[in-house]
Image (tube, grey):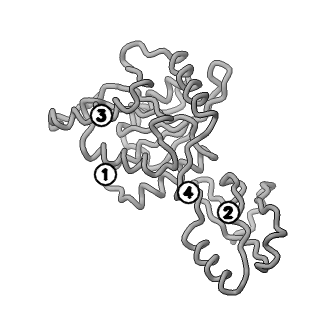
Amino acid sequence: MMLLGKNYQENRRVGNFILGSKVFDTEIIWPPQYCEKASEIVEGKHIALISASHLFDNPLSENEVTEQIKECMFLCDPGPHVIVLVIQPEDFTDVDDKRLDFIFRSFSEDPQKYTIVMKTQNPRRAWWVTPVEKNISKDVIAECVRFQFDFNSGCSRSALLMNMEKIMEENRGNYLKMEKFVLAPTEVQHHEESTAQKNLSITNTIFKHKGVHKYTWHQYTLGRISMIDFIVVSSDLRPYVLDTRVKRGAELSTDI
């Protein structure tokens, strides 16, 4: 599950409510500049939650937002089954709306089908928010009208989990994918072009697998991934290659 929202304190408050435990510190002064992951057994179900409030930071460029989304997708590999959008209707500006649209357009499917809107109140409401900016949130909420809750009006955890189950059932257990995440990076594309000129084929990128079965280098603390090892065969032997898949095993720490 991915938790989106511009107010990191409200995100953490909702995250603690969903997991039924104070796993996120709601008293921190400075918002985290990275994805946060926590998991708990809730009503007999294992729930992994990725909080990504930093995606709405205005200083971030679109390229930086894309990289941050990649890290979030890596942490919830193969992808989130549900997005919980934590929104403060009185403080959702045109800039926020454009950022949300960019985030949603990063996914390969219609993210509204996977989204639950959780309305909360901004504890530190900005006095400069204009009525025009306030109304922008209505369009966002309307797109997810079937799945929305008001956190400050006695929201039920059981009802929320029931709606999550319904979303997963309606989407047949599918999860959101990120087109730019599942495609080979620019460097890999360069190698593919180079090998093609030499009548060779890279088999790593041919077969569809989860990210953990495609990438051969992981930097877990920052959520970085890369494909640094390639399986190359002569193009005339390519039809005989039935599969190429990374098999996870012991960490040998061979990098210097």
Residue 207: % across, % down = 72, 60
Mark 1 → mark 2, Cα distance in angstroms? 31 Å
Dot placed on the residue nearer the N-terminal end, 1 or 2? 1
Dot placed on the residue nearer the N-terminal end, 1 or 3? 1
Q: Quadrant of the N terminus?
A: top right
Dot placed on the residue nearer the N-terminal end, 3 or 2? 3
Q: Nearer the viewer, residue 37 or 150?
A: 150
Q: Which one is closest to the eye, mark 4 or mark 1?
A: 4
Q: Residues at badges 2 and 4 in contact (C-beta under 8 Å)? A: no
For residue 135, above or below residue 185: above
Dot placed on the residue nearer the N-terminal end, 4 or 1? 1
Mark 3 → mark 4, Cα distance in angstroms? 28 Å
Judged left or right of residue 197, residue 12 is left
Mark 1 → mark 3, Cα distance in angstroms? 21 Å
Q: Residues at badges 3 and 4 in contact (C-beta under 8 Å)? A: no
In which image quadrant can residue 188 be found?
bottom right
Three-letter amino acid code at the position of disc 1: Asn
Q: Which one is closest to the eye, mark 3 or mark 2?
A: 3
* Residue identified by numbered label 2: 217
Q: Which one is closest to the eye, mark 1 or mark 3?
A: 3
Q: Which residue lies furthest to the bottom in this view?
A: 198
